[in-house]
Amino acid sequence: MLDDPGLGTLADEGARGLYPFLSPGRADLGAVLAEARRSTEEKAAEITRLRWQVAEVAGDELAECAQEMAIRFAAGGRLFAFGNGGSSTDAQEVATTFLHPPCGLSLPALSLTSDVAVVTALSNDVGFDVVFARQLAALGRRGDIAVGLSTSGGSFNVLKAFEEAARRGMLTVGLAGDQGGRLADLGVLDYLFVIPSSSVHRIQEAQTTVYHVLWELTQHALGAVPGPRARGAG
């Protein structure tokens, strides 16, 4: 595709928007590579800083949330994850991580974005605003866990889902970016983990860390995986 001047135009334009150093006329390959390296290092430093910042601010709350999740899993609870766009793929990863873990216990989890028939039926017949809430109304019960992801914190169908989950006595766990958006003012969330960044890319990268930490801490709370010292022993 890169060899055909008629293909890849839109992709090239998008890349130049994100990476100005790829613009036409930059014939100095050394300068381009140096700028690409600087940009990569800058982004890596930013996500590292964000992860440490979240750990410092929300570390105790993450441990508490994982303990509450473990209590519900031990009592037969299930996890339901949801989000839109990139957050929908993150929701699928959340469910997959808990259901098919690399080690430890397999825990019941479902992504509400995985069944395209259900998603499109609800969107077409009822409305996209309730595409997650209606699924929780049908599947959720007291003692289950609702995990919703939104980079902006303003996705209306995520808000409606949390309201439904709270009505049903589910543990509600939100992941948002910037200052939390509407999720910060919702009032029904048991836990809200906010990534303090305006960059969608950095928010989603840090959110990935958050839900993987929640998974590992939940496994520890259930006694399903050894602690760091035990893993290093022998």
Image (cartoon, rainbow, N blue to C red):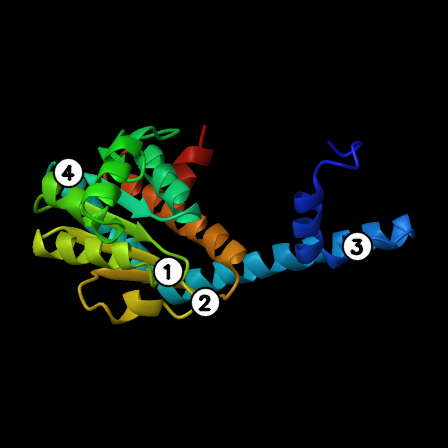
Precedes in sequence: disc 4 or disc 1: 4
In the picture, measured across the screen, residue 14 lies left or right of residue 109, that is: right
Measured as percent of width and height from the top left, residue 107 is found at 24, 33
**Quadrant in the rendering for residue 47:** bottom right
Tell me the residue at 35%/43% (across/down): 91
Query: First in sequence: mark 3 or mark 2?
Result: 3
Percent x, y of residue 66: 27, 49
Q: Residues within 10 Å of mark 1 (few under 14, many from 20)?
A: many
Q: Residues within 10 Å of mark 3 (few under 14, many from 20)?
A: some
Residues at marks 1 and 3 touching, judged by CB atoms closer than 8 Å:
no
Task: Tell me if residue 98 comes above or below residue 133 in the rendering.
Answer: above
**Mark 3 or 4, which is nearer the eye?**
3
User: Crowdedness of circle 2 by 10 Å Cα count: few (<14), some, many (20+)?
Assistant: some
Residue at image point 18% right, 49% down: 133
Q: CA distance from mark 1 to mark 3?
A: 33 Å
**Sequence-earlier tag: 3 or 4:** 3
First-in-chain label (2 vs 1): 1
Instruction: Determine contact: label 3, label 4, CB under 8 Å.
Output: no
Disc 1 marks a residue whose amino acid type is Ala
Tell me the amino acid under the disc marked 4: Ala
Q: Disc 1 or 3, which lies upstream in sequence?
A: 3
Q: Which of labels 2 and 4 is toward the front?
A: 2
Q: CA distance from mark 2 to mark 4?
A: 33 Å
Q: Which mark is residue 23?
A: 3
Instruction: Kindly identify which residue carries mark 2.
Output: 196
